[in-house]
Image (spheres, rainbow, N blue to C red):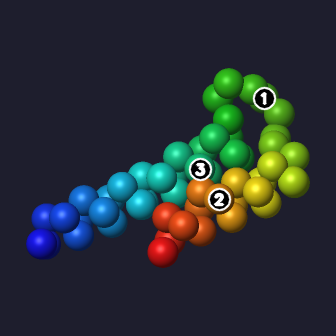
């Protein structure tokens, strides 16, 4: 049970880190993401990772 909990926490943290990198510091484009994209991905990707 402990291992499964740690795996879940690590995957959530990894998801949040990837979200920040790809939204704010996207290596594929040199442009910042638009506000509506940030808000929609915040509610669909980042906040569920916190839960």
Q: Mark 1 points at which residue?
A: 30
Q: Mark 2 points at which residue?
A: 44
Q: Position of residue 43 (x, y in %)?
A: 69, 64
Image-quadrant location for residue 25 = top right
The residue drawn where x is 48% and y is 52% is 15
Image-quadrant location for residue 3 = bottom left
Q: Where is residue 34 in the image (x, y as percent from the top left)?
A: 87, 46
Q: Position of residue 23 (x, y in %)?
A: 69, 46
Q: Of the residues tagged 3 and 2, which is closer to the observer?
A: 2
Does 36 sit left or right of 7 as displayed?
A: right
Task: Judge the density around disc 3: few (<14), some (14-19), many (≥20) Cα neighbours within 10 Å.
Answer: some
Q: Which residue lies furthest to the top in this view?
A: 28
Give the alpha-carbon distance from disc 1 to disc 3, as whole Å: 16 Å
Give the secondary structure at mark 2.
helix
The residue drawn where x is 87% and y is 54% is 35
Precedes in sequence: disc 3 or disc 2? 3
Question: Mark 1 and 2 residues: CB-CB less than 8 Å, in contact?
Answer: no
Q: Name the residue under label 3.
A: 19
Task: Judge the density around disc 1: few (<14), some (14-19), many (≥20) Cα neighbours within 10 Å.
Answer: few
């Amino acid at each position: 049970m402990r291992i499964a909990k740690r795996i879940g926490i690590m995957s959530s943290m990894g998801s949040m880190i990837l979200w920040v990198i790809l939204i704010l510091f996207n290596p594929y484009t040199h442009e910042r993401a638009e506000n509506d994209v940030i808000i929609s991905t915040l509610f669909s990707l980042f906040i569920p990772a916190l839960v």
